[in-house]
Image (cartoon, rainbow, N blue to C red):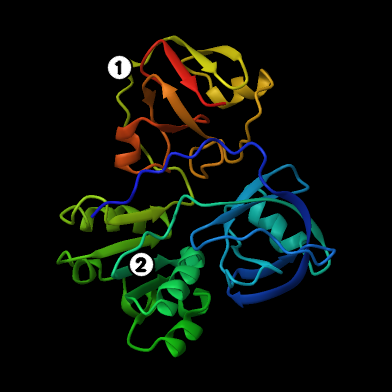
Amino acid sequence: MSAPISTPTAQVREFTAELVVRSRTSVADGVVLLDLADPSGAALPRWEPGAHIDLCLENGLTRQYSLCGDFDDHSIWRIGVLLDPNSRGGSKFVHEQLREGCRVRVRGPRNHFQLVEAPRYRFIAGGIGITPILAMVEQVHRAGQDWTLLYGGRTRASMAFADELATRFPGRVTIWPQDERGLLDLETALKDPADDTLVYCCGPEGLLTAVEQHCAHWPAGVLHVERFAAKQITVDDSAALDRFEVVCRRSGVTIEVAAHESILERLEAAGVPITGSCYEGICGTCEARVLEGSPLHRDSVLNDAERDSGSVMMVCVSGSRGERLVLDL
């Protein structure tokens, strides 16, 4: 079973608005839940499980957070934010500055962690990685589909929504605090591939790497992951050129890019309408459709099928294997 290959064009006019923090709640150690609403009460754009939004903060940083509220409630967007002890200013700003009544510029939503239709699901979450999984669990449960959730964290007190999930879905949810039970038992959870089952995982890199290893013997395409940080990717750059040309067909702009340069930054400098956000190849904001040429992928967003198709690329970190790329920009 494999996920369909998506080939959307780059989004250059995403919904962008200044929203107000309607409520702020502490839901676990170091985790705050923010409900964001339009100041006028207008409905917000629809979203689907797995979607995230950008917070464009006053300190100049842009950070991505998964939507974790009710996808049928268009009056608010709910996000959960973990205070990262190594914060570079994103989560620290949210925790220290964004109070009820504050306004924040928001962009999105977008979704590179889409819930693909399947008879059965195995969800695995680590820490704040529970946020995109929440809406997925809600959707498949409403649809009457078969599912289980294995949810791990450092301590029970640090695991947002743990008690709520365990109480509401007894028998389907396994709460696994590391200080009580040790590391997640992925060997048992993923030992035998299950027919017509997809695996969805979100959490820290150590968990994602372990899940990828334990799913190596599962059919291709069943595992779907979302990362909070760029994965260490080994790329064969032997075919990379010192310089290559990027043609933007819709804009009529052609730029030259050196091997060490970012296509996205060169496009922005040339005035090509495209949006960037993370500049690390993890958020999917700068996705562009490839009309001609062979991309050299360095992102942490696309799956193997999407990479092999060569039909889309993340222009913030990826390059070209040939002298010319033609993009639908």
Q: Tell me whether the residue at label 2 lies in contact with that at label 1, contact meaning CB atoms closer than 8 angstroms.
A: no
Secondary structure found at label 1: helix
Q: Position of residue 188 (x, y in %)?
A: 19, 71
Q: Earlier in the sequence, mark 2 or mark 1?
A: 2
**Label 2: few (<14), some (14–19) or many (≥20) C-alpha neighbours in 10 Å:** many
Residue 145: numbered disc: none
Secondary structure found at label 2: strand
- Occupied quadrant, residue 296: top left
Could you tell me which residue is drawn at 50 percent across and 23 percent down? Answer: 327
The amino acid beneath tag 1 is Ser
The amino acid beneath tag 2 is Ile
Residue 124: numbered disc: 2
Q: Position of residue 237 (x, y in %)?
A: 33, 21
Circle 1 sits on which residue?
A: 238
Q: Horizontally, is 237 left or right of 126 in the view?
A: left
Q: Horizontally, is 154 left or right of 36 in the view?
A: left
Question: Between marks 2 and 1, how big is the CA–CA gap?
Answer: 36 Å
In the image, is residue 301 above or below residue 65? above
Could you tell me which residue is drawn at 51 percent across and 66 percent down? Answer: 131
